[in-house]
Image (cartoon, helix red, strand yellow):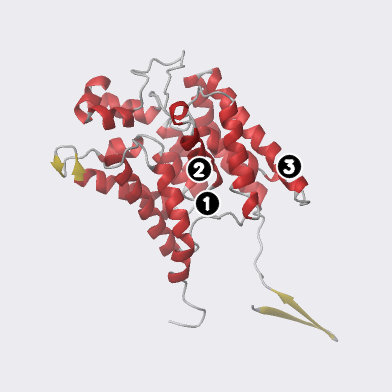
Amino acid sequence: MSTEIQVQPNKMIVSSSPHMFDNTSIPKIMWTVVLALIPAVIFAIYHFGIPALQTLTTGSISAVVFEAVAQKVLRKPITIKDGSAFLCGLLMAMTLPPAVPLFVPIVGSFIAIVVAKHSMGGLGFNIFNPAHIGRAALMASWPVLMTTWTNVSTKVDTFTSATPLNILKQQGYDELIHLFGSQQQMYKSLFFGLRNGSIGETSVLLLLIGGLVLIYKKYVDWVVPVSMIGTVAVLTWIFGPHGLFTGDPLFHIMAGGLMIGAFFMATDMVTTPITRKGKVIFAAGCGLITVLIRLVGGYPEGVCYSILLMNSVTPLIDRFIQPVRYGRK
């Protein structure tokens, strides 16, 4: 640990590191991420209607309540104003189908906050992304509810109640294009969010804008989303439906939860590696596992499980990928 020595007349003051300060704080970061998600949230409510609003509200508020209760029981200072619990509940709710029964986001928030976060020591000590732990537990408990995609929108006419990744997995790429009408129409629907899926599988455009805001604010390292999305793009182009190098990487980039996962989940400061090289390895691993699950596995989507699996490898990455010590080459 370095020290700083300040010499004053007849007095020497020694202070410990750090010696650099700025106005960034946990509440500022958390609420900025929430604001970055607001455009996508508003569009999701417009697209899916009242059920999406109910699911998002229930998930966010219940997460805050569980945070306060857990800290009260553990006799810790109550820090619900820092926005971390609200953000966790919001992200967890955005991974759910819009019309799930309201007990589902409540249970998900409980698992995310109490089990995945506070059982490990609270903010800064959790090994796994709490929002995705909540979703994974819900998927294992109620797989039918978590994979029932009812078209509840009265605002936008979507083409089917199934998700694009579900159609790709069950019927193939050619049938997917046929249902959309054309490849260009499919790209348009995915980019602007005119399709079915989880609440967070909305407008790629709005999620991208929110992610770029976080990169601009330097709350997110751009190498993580670029590495994850780039890995998915390259691999899905190579391993296409009609042989090598016949894939559609643009579809896989915009389909499912890749955008929200790459910008808002895989960039979690607590559960990802410290060094930039470690972050690249982590993100590339997330992309690789996502493609394996999508193309080979039984589930149509693999973003959630890929991030959780790579979370478990983060300590190992940090152990072997370390920055050069000061003063050494």
Outermost residue to the front:
141
Q: Quadrant of the C terminus?
A: bottom left
Of the numbered discs 3 and 1, the one sitting upstream in the chain is 3
Q: Is residue 87 visible?
A: no
Q: Is residue 219 above or below residue 300?
A: below
Q: Which mark is residue 128?
A: 1
Give the Cα distance between marks 3 and 2. Answer: 20 Å
Q: Disc 3 versus disc 1: distance between alpha carbons?
A: 20 Å
Q: What amino acid is found at the position of numbered circle 2 in the picture?
A: His
Q: Secondary structure at mark 1?
A: loop
Which is more toward the observer, 227 or 96? 96
Taking the image as shown, residue 158 lies to the left or right of residue 176, namely right
| Identity, as a three-letter code, of the amino acid under mark 1 | Phe
Query: Where is residue 61 drawn, in percent x and y?
Result: 66, 33
Q: What residue lies at 57% left-to-right and 43% top-to-bottom? A: 33
Question: Which residue is under mark 3?
Answer: 68
